[in-house]
Image (tube, rainbow, N blue to C red):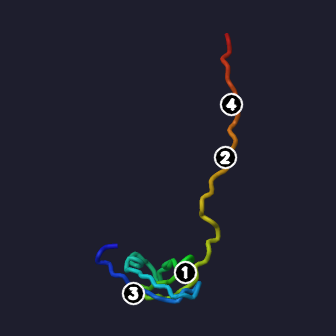
Amino acid sequence: MSAKTRKFWKALKCPVCGERAVFFVTMDAVKDATQYPVPFEVIHDDHKFLIYLDSGLLISRIEEAKPPIASTEAKPKAKSKPKAKTKKTKKET
C-alpha cells in the first residue's frame, strides 16, 4: 500500500458473533474488478465473514462465510516400505 492510498474505515455488527467489527478497505480492493459487487473477506477474532463492496466502497451485502466444502490442506503421503534389494551377481563365463 503506497503512502497516498486512502483508508476507508468501516464498522458494522458481525453476522457471526454479533460484536462490533471495525476494519478498513482501500480502493485497491476494487480497482481491478470487472463486475460489482466485489466480495471482500473480513477476519474477525476467530472467524470470518464476507462483505460485498460496490465501486464506491459502499457495503451492499454482508454474509457469514461458509466453511469450505473440502479441505485444501495437503496431507503427507504415507511412507511405503522400501523394497528389498537383491544382490546381482556377475555370471562367470
Q: Nearer the viewer, residue 62 or 21?
A: 21
Q: Against 77, is 58 above or below?
A: below
Q: Amino acid at mark 2?
A: Lys
Give the amino acid type for the residue marked by disc 1 in the picture: Phe
Residue at position x 43%, y 78% from top?
34
From the top left corner, tell me how far across and down residue 90 is, in percent. Answer: 66, 17
Q: Amino acid at mark 4?
A: Lys
Question: CB atoms at circles 4 and 2 under 8 Å apart?
Answer: no
Q: Characterize the local packing of mark 3: few (<14), some (14-19) or many (20 or more) Cα atoms within 10 angstroms.
A: few
> Disc 4 versus disc 1: distance between alpha carbons?
55 Å
Q: Which residue bears the numbered disc 1?
A: 49
Residue designated by label 4: 85
First reached walking from the N terminus: tag 4 or tag 2: 2
Residue farthest to the left? 4
Image quadrant in which the C terminus is located: top right
Establish if 43 lies above or below 62.
Answer: above
Query: SS of the residue at dot 4?
Result: loop
Farthest top residue in view: 93
Instruction: Indicate the position of residue 43 as horizontal and vertical percent values.
Output: 51, 77
Q: Which residue is mark 3?
A: 56
Q: Nearer the viewer, residue 63 or 33?
A: 63
Q: Are marks 4 and 1 in contact (CB under 8 Å)?
A: no
Residue 72 lies in quadrant: bottom right
Which mark, residue 79?
Answer: 2
- Residue 53 image position (x, y, % from top left): 46, 84
Please tell me which of labels 3 and 4 falls first in the chain.
Answer: 3
Give the tally of numbered discs: 4
Secondary structure of the residue carrying tag 2 is loop
Mark positioned earlier in the residue sequence (1 or 2): 1
Residue at 68% in and 44% down: 80
Q: Nearer the viewer, mark 3 or mark 4?
A: 4
Label 3 and label 2: CA atoms lie apart by: 53 Å
